């Protein structure tokens, strides 16, 4: 198989895997804080157990450990505790994702609740949140379909017009599809409450860099396209790559500029219900 085809299939696999995990890459800032609050509580409970041979029954008992979490943002509660086990929950006091974190000794420790348990803690807005999540999933599937079509179109054109004098056209086209997948996912999943983790920043920076490289190579490639019968097709592929790369770069850079600003005046969907 041609090396370009092999690389293209690799990128398609990466796109599919990336899309399937995008809800964990684009995490809500309040969800990150809720999970961290639970992890801090777990560490304090272990220390408290060593000193008292039991687990703390409420947050008042562990005040001296200076458990730091924003009570206006995160709802944290020790629901039950005795000598050898305890159960605690943590969730955003106001949320757009309906994610609830828990520690339960009987259930193996720390875990994120499934839909059935979540319904016990998130009231009122749950249906609205699930509807928004379904809408985002539909957009993700449509985006994947678009990327597959672009990939398949490129393969067909490459098979019909491949040659040693293709003018650096095909490589940039296939490679620009990866940051395109990232760009459309950013548009769908990123908002002012998204946590800009180091992993997300690295992914966005890499996508922007790949877009710039594809843009430069396509510009150079246009000057190298030989004047022959497949000239219009190769020129069209190069122009398509330039447009996609410009779109990718603009979306990624603008999203970083917009959402890297300090978060203020958060408007969320519902109050903590428990």
Image (cartoon, rainbow, N blue to C red):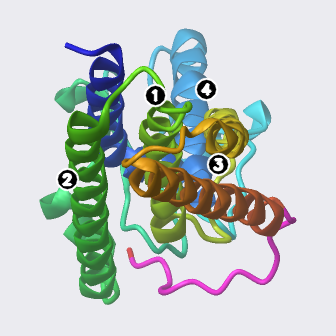
Residue 225 in magenta stretch:
no
Depth check: 18 or 263 in front?
Answer: 18
Depth check: 238 or 163 in front?
Answer: 163
In the picture, the disc for residue 55 is: 1
Circle 4: element type: helix
Disc 2: which residue: 114
**Whole-percent x and y of residue 207?**
61, 41
Q: Quadrant of residue 206?
A: top right
The magenta span reads 261-273
Marked residue nearer the N-terminal end (2 or 1): 1
| 244 relative to 138, above or below | above
x 46%, y 28%: residue = 55
x 54%, y 38%: residue = 226
Query: Which dot, 4 or 3, sits closer to the camera?
Result: 4
Residue 262 in magenta stretch:
yes
**Marks 4/3: CA–CA distance:** 12 Å
């Amino acid at each position: 198989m041609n090396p370009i085809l092999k690389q293209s299939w690799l990128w398609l696999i990466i796109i599919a895997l990336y899309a399937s995990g995008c809800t964990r890459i684009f995490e809500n800032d309040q969800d990150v804080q809720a999970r961290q609050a639970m992890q801090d509580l777990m560490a304090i409970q272990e220390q408290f157990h060593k000193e008292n041979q039991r687990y703390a029954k409420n947050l008042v008992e562990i005040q001296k450990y200076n458990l730091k979490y924003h009570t206006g943002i995160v709802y944290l509660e020790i629901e039950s505790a005795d000598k050898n086990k305890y159960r605690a929950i943590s969730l955003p006091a106001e949320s757009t994702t309906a994610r609830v974190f828990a520690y339960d000794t009987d259930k193996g420790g720390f875990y994120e609740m499934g839909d059935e348990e979540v319904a016990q803690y998130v009231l009122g807005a749950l249906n609205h949140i699930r509807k928004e999540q379904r809408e985002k999933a539909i957009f993700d599937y449509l985006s994947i379909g678009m990327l597959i079509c672009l990939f398949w179109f490129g393969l067909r054109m490459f098979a019909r017009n491949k040659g040693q004098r293709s003018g650096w056209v095909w490589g940039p086209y296939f490679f620009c599809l990866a940051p395109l997948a990232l760009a459309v996912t950013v548009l769908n999943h990123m908002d002012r409450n998204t946590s800009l983790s180091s992993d997300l920043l690295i992914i966005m920076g890499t996508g922007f860099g790949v877009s710039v490289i594809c843009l430069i190579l396509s510009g150079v490639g246009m000057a190298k396209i030989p004047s022959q019968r497949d000239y219009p097709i190769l020129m069209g592929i190069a122009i398509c790559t330039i447009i996609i790369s410009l779109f990718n770069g603009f979306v990624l850079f603008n999203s970083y500029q917009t959402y890297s600003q300090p978060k203020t005046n958060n408007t969320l969907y519902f109050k903590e219900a428990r």
